[in-house]
Amino acid sequence: MRLQDLKKADASWKDRAVHARYRVESIGSLARLLRHGPGKMAEIFRWDWLRTLAGASNLLDMAVYTRTGRYREASAYALAEVIGGIGDLIDSICAAPDRVVIHEDLVPSEIFRGMGLAPFMAEVIGIAVPLVKADWAEKYIDIAENEGTPPDTCSLPKCTMGVALDGQFPKSAAIVTSNMPCDGGMASYTILERELKSPCFRLDIPYNFYNDRAIDYFVSELKRMIAWLEEHTPGRMDWDRLKEVCIERNKAMEHELEIWELIRQKPAPMAGEAIWLAQLIHMVATPGSPRATRTMKNILKRTKKIMENGGGALPEERYRAVLWNPPTLVFPELFVWAEQQYGVALLADMLTYHRHPFIDVSSPDSMLRSLAQIIVEGPMARHTRGPAENFFDDLFYLYEYFSLDMIWMAGHIGCKNTMALNGMFRERCREREIPLFIMNYDLSDTRVVSPVDMKKQAEAFMETVMKAEPLL
Ligand code: SF4
């Protein structure tokens, strides 16, 4: 881990015990895979990404070293559940190898689980592993480029393709993808289809998706997908099982909305990874799972506890910020550092913030209709497709809702859809007198901009634009 820029908090014995407890839990979440026996272990531990993820308990260090008290405990809990959620995904593909469906991050897993399948989100590898080891994706980016992928394609799909080209995906009964979120994401599935030698289904999602006509059309797409999966996999739709998954999702979302309501207060009683990373893994990668509900419920409980004690999560909250664009995978400590150095509380990010409906579970059709709306408004894609308003409206709404002081834009060089908006972005923030920090970097490749340079850019913004005095 890259902890050299962070100052350790003066931890009490209680704080240290919290760290130890959740470290043991995290190791346990991955160690339970051993129950699948030595043959399975030998098969899956061939995968370099899984061996690297086995060190994921180090992610806890990032969350706990700089924090104390209830915020330390809440952050450590959230990180341990993130690791547990990833462990669940791997566990389910080991338990039902003939039912594995590889799916794109823009196609959530509720329907697959309703059909008794074992979903595995392809991009979870390229998202989770660089959080543990910053330069991990680079080998796979190079593999994809050497195979002919244009170098200016986003590094996340390049990494996913590289992992597939290197033979590190589980065997799958089928692949399901869509025409989202961008050209690079779409193109990566031609490689996955070829390398995994699995039949592939592509969902067609309308370009303009905030209207009834789009939802009607997309419901018919979901029905087409279910029929296709019944033909190509052992999965069969069980509407009662899907209903259970949808009810779980609704419960988790209820907790999530309450957390958002509470953190509007100043100082915010929760911030950082317990908001963005927990929700990314539990609401995007594993929505509708009992773990997701439990995690959201427990983060809410901890948020209330911090509030009841009359304080905020941070010892001194001086600024409130949102991170727009996908989070900085190669440098997740960025906001831990900004929190410690300048008192910046990160309250939301682009991937976690949504306006999804609760799922209407009254009938199969109503469930499909709600799920259709959730899928067409998928993370990242709902902001990077269609008119520019899709990108700006949510952001400026969030800015007001959380009474923010500034916007941090993770200017991922490979995300052409959002990079194209930067000129307009600057203009609109200038008109509203919103301090805007656009950080140049690459989502998964530290050779483009190193974490040290990312930090330098943030320092320059905080000290010249915000006139912030470092706390340390
Ligand atoms: S970050 Fe941008 S370019 Fe990369 S996958 Fe997401 S939408 Fe596509």
Image (spheres, rainbow, N blue to C red):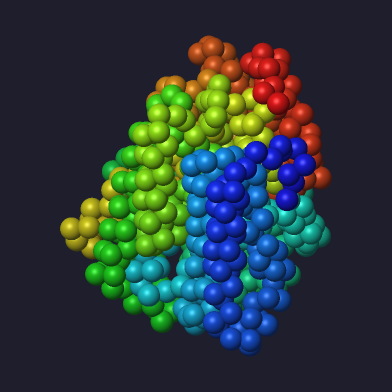
Residue 247 drawn above or below residue 426: below
Residue at position x 55%, y 83% in the image? 36
Q: As rendered, which of 104 and 37 lies closer to the eye?
A: 37
Residue placed most toward the observer, 74 or 426:
74
Residue 307: image quadrant is: top left
Q: Residue at x 61, y 31 (%)?
A: 339
The single residue placed furthest to the front in the displayed view is 13
Residue situated furthest left in the rendering: 362
Q: Is residue 126 visible?
A: no
Q: Is residue 259 left or right of residue 104?
A: left
Kindly tell me whether residue 308 is visible in this rendering: yes
Quarter holding the C terminus is: top right
The structure residue drawn at horizontal position 37% and vertical position 39%, both measured from the top left corner, is 304
Residue 16 location (% of width, % of height):
60, 50
Q: Is residue 229 left or right of residue 384?
A: left
With 263 as the anchor, is 182 left or right in this view? right
Q: Nearer the viewer, residue 240 or 194?
A: 240
Picture coordinates of residue 102, whole percent (x, y): 53, 68
Residue at position x 79%, y 36% from top? 452
The image shows residue 11, relative to residue 112, as above or below, that is above
Query: Image check: 23 left or right of 145?
Result: left
Nearer to us in this view, 153 or 280 = 280
Residue 338 against residue 447 in the figure, above or below? above
